[in-house]
Image (spheres, rainbow, N blue to C red):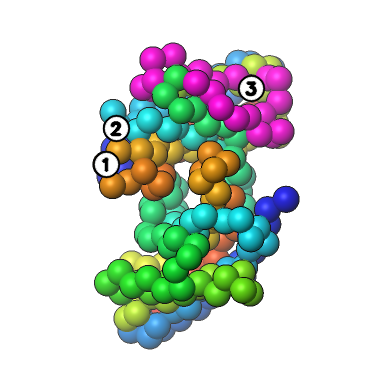
């Protein structure tokens, strides 16, 4: 158990609906990353936060995607007007803390299915 | 841009050693990682190596890095059925936010 939790674990939605996912890292994780993994592929970077500041967004993150980390603890990822191509596993990872400043620990992921 | 490549599949007998290979293109990589993913689960960090090292051993795992050829390998000694999973290598650049660039994964099947 990495201590990183994600909610929900599964989400089924209809095309055009909005969805929001939550990630709770452990308190020592000053960096938080979001990745997307489609079937049969490796995860791809979406965005990351240093404390509450969002420092980088991938070109994969279209205008329909927004992420926040308001108090530097939990983070949310929202997808507006979902499309079938958004179906994937969304993974978050926490990084930081004593002796583990470069190690990213992943949550179990949220599997999104857009019908 | 960065590119990380792995072979798709490896079959090994229980008790034998497994060797999973990975190549990467970015010579600026700071760290190279190995993650394990079991069905329906998130990614488990197995080990990592700093780019100025050429070998790291951690119990049954040995990581070899050939920086000249940009080649990374993971050797699992005495492979067990519980080692059946998908293994991902990944690279990162610390100065660029340490975001991970993953390969496509190698599915390892351990046969009894």
Tell me the distance, in whole angstroms, between the alpha carbons under discs 2 and 1. Answer: 8 Å
Who is closer to the viewer here, B61 or B91? B91
**Vertical comparison of B104 with B22: above or below:** above
Q: Which chain carries label 2?
A: A
Q: Quadrant of residue B49?
A: bottom left
Residue at the image position 56 percent from the left and 27 percent from the top: A55
Q: Position of residue A98 (x, y in %)?
A: 27, 41
Query: For mark 3, what is the residue?
Result: A65
Q: Which chain carries label 1?
A: A
What segment is highlighted magenta in the picture?
Answer: A53-74
Q: Position of residue A19 (x, y in %)?
A: 56, 19
Tell me the distance, in whole angstroms, between the alpha carbons under discs 2 and 3. Answer: 26 Å
Query: For mark 2, what is the residue?
Result: A28
Q: What element carries label 1?
A: loop
Q: Give me the disc on residue A98.
A: 1
**A72 relative to B8 in the view: left or right:** left
Tell me the distance, in whole angstroms, between the alpha carbons under discs 3 and 1. Answer: 32 Å
Is A60 part of what is drawn in magenta?
yes
Q: What element carries label 3?
A: strand
Q: Position of residue B96 (x, y in %)?
A: 57, 41
Residue at the image position 55 percent from the left and 49 percent from the top: B93
């Amino acid at each position: 158990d990495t201590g990183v939790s994600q909610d929900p674990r599964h989400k089924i939605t209809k095309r055009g609906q909005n969805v929001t996912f939550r990630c709770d890292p452990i308190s020592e994780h000053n960096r938080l990353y979001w990745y997307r993994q489609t079937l049969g592929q490796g995860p791809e970077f979406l965005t990351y936060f240093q404390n509450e500041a969002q420092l980088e967004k991938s070109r994969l993150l279209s205008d329909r995607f927004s992420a926040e980390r308001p108090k530097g603890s939990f983070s949310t990822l929202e997808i507006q007007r979902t499309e079938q191509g958004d179906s994937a596993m969304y993974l978050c990872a926490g990084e930081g803390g004593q002796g583990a400043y470069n190690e990213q620990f992943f949550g179990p992921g949220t599997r999104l299915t857009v019908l | 841009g960065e590119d990380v490549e792995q072979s798709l599949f490896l079959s090994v007998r229980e008790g034998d050693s497994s060797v999973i290979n990975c190549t990467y293109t970015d010579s600026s990589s700071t760290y190279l990682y190995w993650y394990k993913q079991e069905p329906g689960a998130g990614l488990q960090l197995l080990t990592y190596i700093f780019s100025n090292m050429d070998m790291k051993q951690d119990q049954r795992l040995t990581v070899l890095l050939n920086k000249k050829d940009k080649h990374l390998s993971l050797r699992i000694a005495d492979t067990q059925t519980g080692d059946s999973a998908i293994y991902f290598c990944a690279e990162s650049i610390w100065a660029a936010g340490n975001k991970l660039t993953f390969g496509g994964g190698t599915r390892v099947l351990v046969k009894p």
